[in-house]
């Protein structure tokens, strides 16, 4: 988006990418919403976020939240937040085989504490070596809490009676203890002296805005440190990004929503993309950008720009994007087109999934989703014979029917549509009576449904 104001000889530091993870309903969307000051929660269907959105919060908007931040010498241009539908989506957001996010916020409802999905989230972050901060949210729900709108945590904390103070200390300590069980040393943020060694826990409320400025300050601290030390990614080279979503737009046809994590992309650039028919190339017709502080998924009036610099969320319009695979890489082709195409092809096959000669067939909308579902199935010792990205086709139904073991004669569609002719086939008695079909958007619901069905079958 913007380059550093007073960059001079200093290398351009790109906008760090931040993911928000945590248990369903613990307040991820509300927190992001509070941070960007818009209202996405009310526009969402159901409690679970169904899509992935990105928002850039410029550094000025962040520092203006707190007087003490204005004086800091901050070189990052802002933060790019990605709203992930549950922790599994984090694995979907990949960049060159690793995590797309530079940092993460793990959201935990302070009244409920860590849940299995929260623990899974911190394990994923540990595996990816992604630095994170814990937001202990819904502070205003603590019985007896007296709120002061938008106040820093310590100021509000000082206004509480002894009972509430003690309760908060206990809740935070519970989080510290749980994190310790998982090998993380943590402290309430104001007691952390070395942020490289200790995770910071920031008590916040998305509803009252309390602690939000503290959370952002800790995030910026983490970002400065990691971006300067390890991640001096160029913003000048050929653009590299990850496809969040393929979307049909009125007047534009198929477009791709991309998180650009490196380099620059320009109108007229040749780009390489991964489609269901393999790697192909196309020419960027237009670049549409969300306005700062707005959600790209609900944005309808786009800003047309000539170029976009990492990190940014950008909608790319170009011919031949309808078959692009969500979660796949996008690269601007520079001097070595064959190398770029080969590297995309390699990334697409590096799906970390173990297949068995006997097992179920699964389809999913993205590589990451496929991996996440496979991992969950293998954790329950459920073998998978075939795992593919894309909608459920007639061929998938026919192939499922040929599986010998009735326990595995199962077709799972995770977050992906069923093509009409496949739907018809699934209704035919010859298939309907033979095949078990599961579909859904939440991995553990699919898993529960499968396990319940299997238990009934065995009985
Ligand atoms: P997500 O599933 O993690 O994205 O959670 P949401 O942001 O959708 O929040 C789930 C529910 O918790 C909603 O009803 C929110 O209004 C509520 N909620 C979220 N944050 C807070 C908070 O700070 N205080 C209170 N009282 N409720 C909250
Ligand atoms: Mg949500």
Image (tube, rainbow, N blue to C red):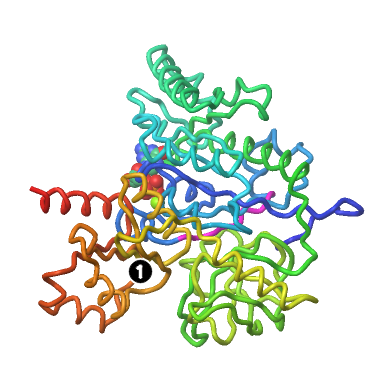
In the image, residue 400 lies in the stretch drawn in magenta: no
Residue 171 position by quadrant:
top left
* In the image, residue 211 above or below residue 252: above
Circle 1: element type: loop
Residue 384 position by quadrant:
bottom left
Quadrant in which the N terminus is drawn = bottom right
Q: As drawn, which residue projects farthest toward the left?
A: 459
* In the image, residue 122 above or below residue 262: above
Q: What main secondary structure does the magenta stretch of the protein show? A: strand
Per the image, the residue denoted by label 1 is 416
Residue 71 position by quadrant:
top right
Number of marks in picture: 1
Q: Between residues 198 and 53, which one lies in front from this camera angle? A: 198
Report x, y in % for residue 403: 24, 67
* In the image, residue 249 above or below residue 108: below
In the displayed structure image, the side of residue 433 where residue 417 appears, left or right: right
**Residue drawn at x 63%, y 84% as measured from the top left:** 282
Report x, y in % for residue 196: 68, 30
Q: Looking at mark 1, is its residue's CB closer than 8 Å to ligand 2?
A: no
Crowding at mark 1 (Cα within 10 Å: few <14, some 14-19, many 20+): some
In the displayed structure image, the side of residue 128 where residue 341 appears, left or right: right
Report x, y in % for residue 174: 42, 21
Report x, y in % for residue 56: 61, 57
**Residue drawn at x 54%, y 23% as measured from the top left:** 188
Residue 291 makes an appearance in the image: no
Q: Between residues 391 and 396, which one lies in front from this camera angle? A: 396
Q: As drawn, which residue projects farthest toward the top?
A: 162
The residues colored magenta run 52-59
In the displayed structure image, the side of residue 383 where residue 276 appears, left or right: right
Residue 235 makes an appearance in the image: yes
């Amino acid at each position: 988006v913007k380059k550093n104001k007073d960059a001079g000889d200093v290398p351009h530091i790109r906008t760090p990418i931040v993911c928000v993870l945590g248990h369903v309903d613990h307040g991820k969307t509300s927190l992001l919403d509070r941070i960007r000051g818009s209202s996405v929660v009310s526009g969402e269907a159901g409690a679970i976020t169904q899509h992935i959105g990105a928002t850039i919060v410029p550094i000025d908007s962040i520092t203006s939240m707190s007087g003490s931040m204005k004086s800091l010498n901050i070189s990052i241009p802002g933060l790019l937040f990605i709203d992930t539908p549950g922790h599994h989506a984090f694995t979907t957001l990949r960049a060159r085989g690793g995590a797309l996010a530079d940092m993460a916020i793990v959201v935990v409802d302070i009244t409920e504490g860590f849940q299995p999905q929260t623990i899974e989230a911190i394990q994923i972050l540990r595996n990816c070596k992604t630095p994170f901060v814990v937001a202990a949210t819904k502070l205003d729900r603590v019985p007896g809490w007296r709120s002061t709108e938008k106040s820093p945590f310590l100021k509000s904390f000082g206004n509480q009676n002894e009972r509430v103070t003690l309760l908060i200390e206990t809740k935070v300590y519970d989080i510290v203890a749980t994190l310790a069980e998982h090998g993380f040393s943590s402290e309430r943020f104001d007691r952390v002296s070395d942020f490289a060694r200790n995770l910071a826990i920031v008590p916040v409320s998305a509803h009252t805005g309390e602690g939000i400025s503290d959370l952002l300050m800790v995030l910026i601290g983490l970002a400065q440190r990691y971006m300067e030390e390890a991640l001096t990614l160029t913003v000048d080279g050929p653009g590299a990004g990850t496809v969040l979503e393929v979307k049909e737009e009125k007047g534009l046809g198929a477009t791709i929503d991309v998180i650009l994590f490196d380099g620059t992309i320009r109108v007229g650039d040749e780009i390489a993309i991964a489609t269901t028919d393999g790697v192909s190339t196309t020419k960027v017709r237009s670049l549409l950008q969300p306005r700062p502080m707005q959600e790209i998924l609900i944005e309808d009036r786009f800003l047309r720009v000539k170029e976009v610099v990492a990190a940014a969320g950008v909608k790319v319009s170009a011919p031949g994007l309808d078959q692009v695979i969500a979660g796949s890489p996008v690269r601007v082709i520079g001097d070595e087109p064959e190398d770029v195409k080969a590297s995309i092809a390699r990334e697409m096959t590096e799906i970390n999934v173990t297949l068995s000669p006997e097992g179920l067939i699964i389809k999913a909308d993205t590589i990451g989703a496929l991996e996440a579902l496979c991992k969950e199935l293998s954790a329950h010792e459920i073998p998978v014979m075939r795992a593919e990205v894309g909608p459920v086709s007639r061929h998938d139904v026919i192939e499922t029917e040929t599986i010998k073991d009735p326990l595995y004669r199962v077709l799972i569609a995770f977050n992906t549509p069923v093509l009409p002719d496949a739907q018809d086939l699934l209704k035919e008695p010859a298939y309907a009576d033979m095949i078990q079909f599961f579909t859904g958007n939440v991995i553990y619901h699919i898993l529960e449904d499968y396990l319940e069905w299997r238990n009934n079958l065995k009985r």
